[in-house]
Amino acid sequence: MTKAFGYVAALLLTTFVAHSQQTPSFTPDVYRELPLGSIRPQGWLKDQLVIMRDNSSGHLDEIHPKIGNDNGWLGGRGDAWEETPYWLDGAVPLAYLLDDPALKTKVLKYINWTLDHQRPSGYFGGITKEEREKGTQVTPDNCAAGDDWWPKMVMLKVLQQYYEASGDKRVVPFMTRYYAYQSKSLKACPLGKWTEWATSRGTENVMMIQWLYNINHDANLLTLASEIEAQSFPWSDWLGGRDWVIDAAANQTDQRWMSRHGVNVGMALKAPAINYQRTGNKKYLAQLQTGWKDLMTLHGLPMGIFSSDEDLHGNDPTQGSELCAIVESMYSLEKIIAITGDIRYMDALERMTFNALPTQTTDDYNNKQYFQIANQVQVSRGVFDFSLPFDRGMNNVFGLRSGYTCCTANMHQGWTKFATHLWYATAKGLAALEYSPSDLKTKVNGQDIVIHEKTNYPFGDAIVFEFETATPVAMPLTLRIPLWCKEATIDINGQLPRFVKGGQLLTLENTWKNGDKLTLKLPMEVTTSNWAKNSRAVERGPLVYALKIEERWEKGNEATEGDYFSVYPASDWNYGVLEQIVKNPATLKVTEVSVATPFVWNQAHAPISIAVPARKIPNWKLIDGVAHQPITTRVNVYQGDVSAQEETVTLIPYGFTKVRVVAFPVVK
């Protein structure tokens, strides 16, 4: 057993013990997160992480001035706010998922400086103006000499991941001292003293306090968590009520915009679950269910994310979604899954990850879109339908610095944290709740076990689990059978298959032996779903399909935001799908090819296509770069002029497109 593996196993067992020692109000997670490094991505997922490491994720400090120039998290005068912790929040798990020595060394430079420069009072972060210019000591009695609470919340997430991967004994005392400082300082320096970002994102703070409580069981931490929750935006109440989400749909003024800011909302989704964890009060679970349903009903888009450009902005397929909102919503869902064990959020995470996330960066991960659009027929500079257009019109193009650079720094946590949440632990076993190729190495009931998950999912329907263990391991294994799957099949070692209805979490009680092979098949049927203005999206399994449009890329430069790429359609796009396929989508022809190695999310590598009968809508044209949706009446068919000629168009998975139509009008 390697030293790292031994530490991971010990930490996992310690966590199990910790749950039995908690206060009565603290609710154990249904599914417990495994320490960083337990899961190693393989196949297409590993290819994605390697691309990230070799490009911006692994080298952002070299190409992004805010992180590279005199950085505040290294004691300099540069960025000491959110962007450096944002980058580390993705770069640290990337370094340990790939076990990459060079990237570990790079991120450790920032972690070591942070750990080594905690003030005697417990305060930490970049050197403040008061400290630098006056030599002032930051203490609870002099907390105003400190700086914003918000970026520290992100850095604490970084340190938590680093601790679980490394076991560095400096981390827990560091966090203990900081929370003692925070507890003594909140009256004089409340959460919103410096910015409203901290009050809108207080859940991030509460979450990490409760993580530490799981380790040391100090009840004072729960008191602090409750105090911070009281000073934060009341997201749980807002999500559970109806007024907030309705007002967000109706109000696009500058009033209370922080309460409908898409990234704030993405982070806040987990607030009810975090509060339930601390209190055991099931009202929070009801608030979460109401809030998620209302949010996706009023603001949801076919690719699984809500509109956020930057504010919540309704469900029209020409609204934008910010990249930061996607990765933060993914992380919130990963936490919600652990705490609630609710399959609906597992399916929601899968839909968002496999559709919304990959389309918003270039193949090499060196350029990103600040806002993506569902029906995105053109990528270019412009105002579009966004609530935040910017005077330079750079929100829709692909660039390293286009739009705000918060997403340049924050996008790296999307794939890395998804990879760390494929598997969870249960009290006596393991659970595979999201599927992608990976190797799991852990201990169960004191016994070593390795599970190789071999699959091309979500592009194929077969998932094979191969077991490697020195001695048989008796444990329950939980598998998610998605809501979209009518009936799955399971067989162990080639025995007669078992048929299982979809929409459930299936637990298999078994003694697993070395060489055992479990095969799960999730048949994928073509279906259609209804979206804004009576449009339809074509789906198959976890993937949403969009029109394949030939792309013409152009490189440009903007003096402030640098180089960028526009993408224009080089083939026709103004199609409506025939009513007959809405009534009987199972007739559509699906073509599958091998998943390419190395794997890239672009048109040329799309491993699945669907041939769809369609007709052109001549009057559906771009207006200032926007393909405003033709209205389909309640009889379900577009009433305007439609071409008499029927054509067959090709749809590919949404994540492989840059220009596309995904929400189609329906025509005769």
Image (tube, grey):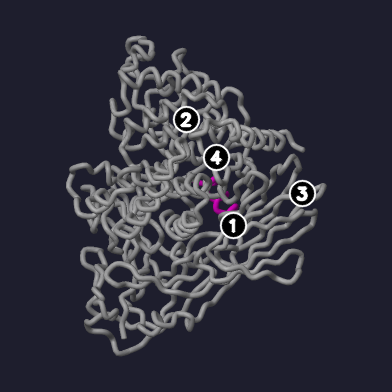
Disc 3 element: strand
Residue marked by disc 4: 28
Percent position (x, y) of residue 48? 55, 53
Disc 1 marks which amino acid? Ser
Instruction: Check contact, mark 1 vs mark 3: CB within 8 A.
Output: no
As measured in the structure, the alpha-carbon distance from the residue carrying label 2 to the one carrying label 3 is 34 Å
Q: How many marks?
A: 4
Q: CA distance from mark 2 to mark 1?
A: 31 Å
Quick one: label 1 or label 4, which is nearer the N terminus?
A: 4
Q: Secondary structure at mark 2?
A: helix
| Contact (Cβ within 8 Å) of mark 2 with mark 1 | no
| Neighbourhood count class around disc 4 (C-alpha, 10 Å): few under 14, some 14–19, many 20 upward | many
Does the magenta run of residues contain 49? Answer: yes
Magenta residue span: 45-55
Which secondary structure is most common in the magenta stretch? helix
Residue 536 coordinates in the image, percent (x, y): 35, 73
Q: Earlier in the sequence, mark 2 or mark 4?
A: 4
Relative to 520, residue 330 above or below: above
Residue at mark 3: 473
Residue drawn at (24%, 68%) of the image: 628
The Cα atoms of the two marked residues, 1 and 4, are separated by: 26 Å
